[in-house]
Every structure is written in structure tokens, then in C-alpha cells.
Image: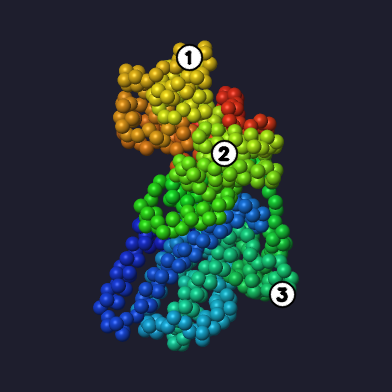
């Protein structure tokens, strides 16, 4: 929001929230009714053009968002190196309001102006008219209008909202108050109106002009340069015709739209523009210290990744009803990452001098339960470890990929095959156990373990035994497995579950396989604490459900603007935090296989570095 919001700041349909696309329903209904009640020879199928254009622009802009975020997470060719936070994502979540507005106004114009009806698909003369008018008066008018918006009166009431984003993303280009978009519409409609009035309008030229404006706006706000240096060296005059971005860091210079000619003419070209362009094309290499490996969970979780829908990624993961309607796209994306079969960079963060990246393995959760996929998955994980090793990365945390003994023996197989690794492989079990242990109320005298016993379970059980708490194990086979690992002096603390002690115990450690029937066996007020990386399906309102082991991150951890799966904002899984701690402390040992760390030491380290219980 602008610092002093002026008249017509809010959009007319802002009260509809996420249901704002309903404003298009009457128009779509009117178009359908008009086509159905008109003779076939007289039907103007151009009435559907605004809706086709809307879909095209939404897809096109989303592709730019994905490309930009992918590049800025992995590329050294960035313009600004500062971070993006959740506040910017929230402010820019309504970037598509402009797309809706244009669809409404184009549709209205087709009825208000007779020349706008029955337009041909293409008219070359009209396309030339639109091009010349844009290069001429539109660029000139926009320059002075934009310069006027930087006057302190208009800037504080309108344009400061746009400049709240210092580090830009493609969608930043369309984030303006409503009144400002009205101004822009009149400026950019000039070439279209002249071509249409002259009888030379066409659907292709109008749609192409709007999409071309989208492309240039996205290029100017994507935070990395597209135009290669050789182009300006071969044709020096290009620097007056093609813009390279600096406006958001030097806000009272570089007012031109796509052609900086007028900035050169009127002395508003920032002196550091060329230098910044050279620096961004050369790039600045960041040495990565920590990599966290993850993978998409459900099919729809691909949209939850930072590379997906930015607003969804900024919220804890929940399945949205409208995503089911996108199943062809969802299936296509699954096939794409399957075919490329390559780990890809998802995001990048910084904590003090520690640089971190998140890499995603191209497999979904259901693949991990398939016997045929175990070998390919292990190959991808090992390849990622060796790639990180070759790049001099200090620590790699396995995160969701640490699926226990069945898949990779808690990561030990990678060390057995590569015994000279300098990179430290961390499964994070110790910190996960520390989080769980410190979640259990101190006065608890007995804890029930329900689910498959993991390395994390063993560490928690050992700590409970040390303090004299009773460890009750629900499944007979898991009881034998856990008891065989507990030292002799603590054997008396191990108890098999029975109907009597199960009903008395009000603290349950569970995995995500705990079904509704098993949950009904718990007494009222039971505290369900997950020890797995996936949450439990909540079926009872009279019990307490904790989140999966996680911690709040310190404020100085930068560039966090997406949620880790189902966790709240600025909360990270314990397995991911463990890798960060390993690098911060400079620990020179692996934590995988049967190797564990001192649970109290790891917990103290997390607190000392600013991580807090979630």
C-alpha cells in the first residue's frame, strides 16, 4: 500500500478476495448468450477474445515468475542481491488484477465502439500503426507520466506502492494502485484505438501488442539481464532503444518504459546504469555452504514450491479444490521432471555469511514406496551429493530423502560407496529427536510409541529412559526392534502396549500412518507428537496435534518467502535446520547411518544460533 493512499487506490472488486474472477462471469454469460442468439453468419466470435487473452496472459506471466525465480536461485547474473520476504509476496499477490481489468475494458470496448466488432485475425497495416504509435507518442507520454508519478505528492499516494519492492520479480511490473492502472490503460490504448478507428484493427495485433508489453515489463522486472553485452558492442545505438533495469534501486532516474531515449534526452539516465549492466552480465559467484535436499510430496505440491504459484508457496501446504481442475497440467509437469530426471534448484537463502540452497529430487512421495524406484532414487541422491562435493559445498542435509533403513540405511550407503567424501552428510535425526524430546511435557511419566521405529525414535526413547520415563511401544515387532537397541540398564523402562496402559498414556509419538481407528484408542486430551517428516491426519477434536519436528528460524535468515511444505511461515523442519547447524558449528563428522550426535549439545547449538521451538 502507498504511504498515503489516495483516491481510487483499491480495486473495485477487492472485497471479493480470491473470488475476484467472479466479476468476469456476467461478461462470459453475456458473450455466450449473444453468440447463441445471433444468426451463424452474423456471429462475432471475437467476443471470446478477451477471455482467451486473459488465459494466455495468466499462463505467460506465470512462466515468467517460474523462470525468474529459477534463475535468481541458481544464477550469478542477478541485478540486486538483497532478499525478498513474505511482505512483498503478500503485497504482490494481486498482480492479476490488471489482467482482469484489461479483459473487462476490452470486452466493453467491443460493444461501445462499432469498429471493434468483427475484427479480422490479422491486419499488417494495423500492426504497423500500433508499432509506430508506441515507439512515438506512447513512449514519450509514458516518460512524462511516470516522471510525474515520482513527484512527492503523487509518489506518496500512489507510485510508492510499486516501489515498495526493491528487489523486483516479474509480477512487480503490474502491482500498482487502481488509479495508476487507469492512467496506463489510456496511454497504452492509444495505438489500439487509432488502428481500430482507421479500420485496420485485428485480434492478432491487439493481443500481440498487449502480450509484447507483458514481455517487456517482465524482462525489466525479473532481476537479471537478458540482452547480451555483444549486442550493445556491435550496435551501440541499441542502448537508446532497449532498456536495462536500474529504476527500482535508483527510483528518481530512468523513467522511460522500454526505450531509454528520453532519459538520455532529458538528463534522467542514471550514471551507474551501464556499470550495473556490466556487473550483472559478468555476474557474482556465491560460494554455497549448505544444500538441503527435498522432493515434491503430493502431485499438487509442485505448485507449492517456490518456483510454482508464489502466493501458494508463501502459505502452508493444503490441497486446493481448483488445483484438481488442472490435472492435465499437473500430470504434464510430473512427466517433465521425470523425463529430465535431474535435480533442480528451488530456492536460496543466507544466514550471516552462510549461503544455502534447496535442491529438489525429481520424484514424488509415492515413488518412495515403489520397489522399482529405490535404485533410481538412490542414484539421484548420490549424484546430488557428488555434485555438491565437486562444488566445494560443506554440508548436505537429506531432509525428506532420509526415508529410513529401507531406502538408504539412513544415508549410510552413500558413505560406503564414497568413503573419501569431504562434504558432510547429515540426516538430522539428532535435532529432530531433540525437538520432540523438548516438546514432551517434563512431568510426563510414560510415552506411547505408535508407528515404525526410526533412528529418531530410538534417540527419543533413550532420553526418556535416562530420565526414568516409561516407554510403551504399540506394535510387537517394533517393540522387539527398539528394545534390542536400548542399553541393558534401561530395559526395565521398555513396556509393550496393552489396553490398560494405552488408555492411561496421554502422550503419543506417532508417524503419518496413524489411522483414524488407532487414534480412537487414545484417551481424551491425548497429545499426538509426530516423529516422522509427514504430518498426521487429524481426526479428533478432543486431542492435541503437534506439527512435525521443526523450529522457528532467526530473523537474520534472509530471503525466506516460501513455506516448507505444511509448516507455517519462517518455520523449518528440524532435519533442514540440522544441516545449517552442522555448517555453522563447523562439525567435521557425518550424521547418517548409525552415527548420532549429543542431543543436548545439538539442542543448545540450535538455541544459541537463534532457532526457537515452533
Q: CA distance from mark 3 to mark 1?
A: 80 Å
Q: Is residue 395 left or right of residue 22?
A: right
- Which numbered marker is on residue 270? none
Secondary structure at numbered mark 2: loop
- Residue 397, how many percent across, how many down? 59, 38
Residue at the disc numbered 1: 491
Residue at 37% of width from left, 20% of height from top? 497
Question: In the image, is residue 41 above or below residue 399?
Answer: below
Question: Residue 384 in the image: x percent, y percent?
Answer: 61, 45
Query: Vertically, is 266 above or below 584?
Result: below
Quarter where residue 509 is shown: top left
Q: Residue furthest front?
A: 372
State how far apart marks 1 and 2 are (Cα). Answer: 32 Å
512 or 496, nearer to the observer: 496
Relative side of 349 to 463, left or right: right
Residue 232 showing in the rendered view:
yes
* Marks 3 and 1 close (CB-CB < 8 Å): no
Secondary structure beneath label 1:
helix
Category of crowding for the residue at label 2, using alpha-carbon neighbours closer than 10 angstroms: few (below 14), some (14–19), many (at least 20): many
Q: Please tell me which residue is depicted at 50% across the width and 47% down the height of the picture.
A: 363
Count of numbered tags:
3
Camera-nearest label, 3 or 1 = 1
Which of discs 3 and 2 lies nearer the camera? The answer is 2
Provide the residue designation for mark 2.
398
Q: Of marks 3 and 1, which one's residue comes earlier in the chain?
A: 3
Which badge, 1 or 2, comes first in the chain's sequence? 2
Reading the image, the residue beneath label 3 is 235
* Marks 1 & 2, CB-CB < 8 Å contact: no
Amino acid at each position: 500500500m502507498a504511504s498515503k493512499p489516495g483516491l481510487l487506490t483499491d480495486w473495485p472488486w477487492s472485497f471479493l478476495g480470491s473470488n475476484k474472477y467472479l466479476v468476469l462471469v456476467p461478461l462470459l454469460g453475456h458473450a455466450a448468450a449473444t453468440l447463441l442468439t445471433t444468426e451463424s453468419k452474423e456471429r462475432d466470435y471475437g467476443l471470446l477474445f478477451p477471455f482467451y487473452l486473459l488465459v494466455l496472459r495468466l499462463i505467460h506471466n506465470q512462466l515468467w515468475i517460474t523462470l525468474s525465480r529459477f534463475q535468481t536461485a541458481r544464477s550469478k547474473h542477478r541485478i540486486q542481491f538483497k532478499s525478498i520476504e513474505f511482505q512483498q509476496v503478500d503485497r504482490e499477490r494481486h498482480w492479476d488484477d490488471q489482467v482482469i481489468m484489461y479483459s473487462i475494458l476490452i470486452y466493453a470496448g467491443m460493444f461501445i465502439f462499432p469498429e471493434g466488432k468483427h475484427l479480422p485475425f490479422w491486419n499488417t497495416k494495423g500492426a504497423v500503426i500500433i508499432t509506430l504509435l508506441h515507439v512515438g507518442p506512447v513512449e514519450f507520454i509514458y516518460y512524462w507520466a511516470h516522471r510525474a508519478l515520482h513527484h512527492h505528492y503523487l509518489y506518496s499516494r500512489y507510485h510508492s506502492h510499486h516501489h515498495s519492492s526493491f528487489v523486483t520479480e516479474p509480477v512487480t511490473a503490474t502491482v500498482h494502485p487502481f488509479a495508476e492502472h487507469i492512467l496506463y490503460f489510456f496511454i497504452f490504448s492509444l495505438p489500439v484505438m487509432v488502428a481500430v478507428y482507421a479500420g485496420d484493427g485485428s485480434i492478432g495485433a491487439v493481443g500481440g501488442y498487449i502480450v509484447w508489453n507483458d514481455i517487456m515489463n517482465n524482462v525489466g522486472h525479473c532481476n537479471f539481464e537478458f540482452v547480451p553485452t555483444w549486442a550493445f558492442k556491435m550496435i551501440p545505438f541499441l542502448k537508446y532503444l532497449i532498456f536495462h533495469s536500474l529504476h527500482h534501486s535508483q527510483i528518481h532516474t530512468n523513467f522511460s518504459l522500454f526505450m531509454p531515449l528520453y532519459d538520455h534526452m532529458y538528463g534522467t539516465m542514471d550514471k551507474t546504469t551501464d556499470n550495473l549492466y556490466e556487473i550483472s552480465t559478468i555476474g557474482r559467484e556465491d560460494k554455497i555452504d549448505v544444500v538441503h535436499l527435498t522432493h515434491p510430496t503430493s502431485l499438487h505440491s509442485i505448485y507449492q514450491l517456490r518456483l510454482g504459484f508464489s502466493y501458494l508457496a508463501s502459505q502452508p501446504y493444503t490441497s486446493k479444490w481448483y488445483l484438481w481442475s488442472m490435472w492435465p497440467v499437473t500430470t504434464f509437469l510430473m512427466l517433465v521432471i521425470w523425463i529430465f530426471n535431474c535435480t533442480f534448484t528451488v530456492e536460496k537463502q543466507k544466514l550471516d555469511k552462510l549461503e544455502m540452497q534447496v535442491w529438489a529430487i525429481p520424484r514424488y512421495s509415492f515413488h518412495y514406496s515403489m520397489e522399482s524406484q529405490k535404485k533410481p532414487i538412490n542414484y539421484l541422491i548420490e549424484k546430488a551429493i557428488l555434485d555438491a562435493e565437486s562444488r566445494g559445498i560443506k554440508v548436505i542435509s537429506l531432509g525428506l530423502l532420509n526415508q529410513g533403513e529401507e531406502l538408504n540405511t539412513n544415508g549410510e550407503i552413500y558413505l560406503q560407496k564414497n568413503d573419501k567424501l569431504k562434504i558432510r552428510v547429515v540426516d538430522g535425526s539428532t535435532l529432530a529427536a531433540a525437538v520432540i524430546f523438548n516438546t514432551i511435557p517434563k512431568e510426563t511419566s510414560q510415552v506411547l510409541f505408535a508407528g515404525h521405529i526410526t533412528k529418531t525414535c530410538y534417540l527419543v526413547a533413550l532420553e526418556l529412559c535416562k530420565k526414568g520415563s516409561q516407554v510403551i511401544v504399540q506394535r510387537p515387532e517394533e517393540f522387539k526392534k527398539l528394545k534390542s537397541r536400548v542399553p541393558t540398564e534401561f530395559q526395565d523402562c521398555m513396556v509393550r502396549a496393552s489396553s490398560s496402559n494405552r488408555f492411561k498414556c496421554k502422550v503419543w509419538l506417532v508417524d503419518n500412518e496413524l489411522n483414524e481407528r488407532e487414534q480412537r484408542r487414545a484417551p481424551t486430551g491425548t497429545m499426538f507428537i509426530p516423529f516422522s517428516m509427514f504430518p498426521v491426519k487429524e481426526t479428533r477434536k478432543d486431542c492435541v496435534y503437534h506439527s512435525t519436528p521443526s523450529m522457528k528460524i532467526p530473523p537474520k535468515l534472509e530471503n525466506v518467502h516460501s513455506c516448507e511444505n505444511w509448516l507455517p511461515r519462517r518455520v523449518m523442519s528440524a532435519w533442514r535446520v540440522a544441516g545449517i547447524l552442522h555448517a555453522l558449528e563447523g562439525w567435521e563428522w557425518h550424521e547418517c547411518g548409525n552415527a548420532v550426535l549429543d542431543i543436548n549439545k545439538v539442542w543448545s547449538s540450535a538455541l544459541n544460533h537463534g532457532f526457537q521451538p515452533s
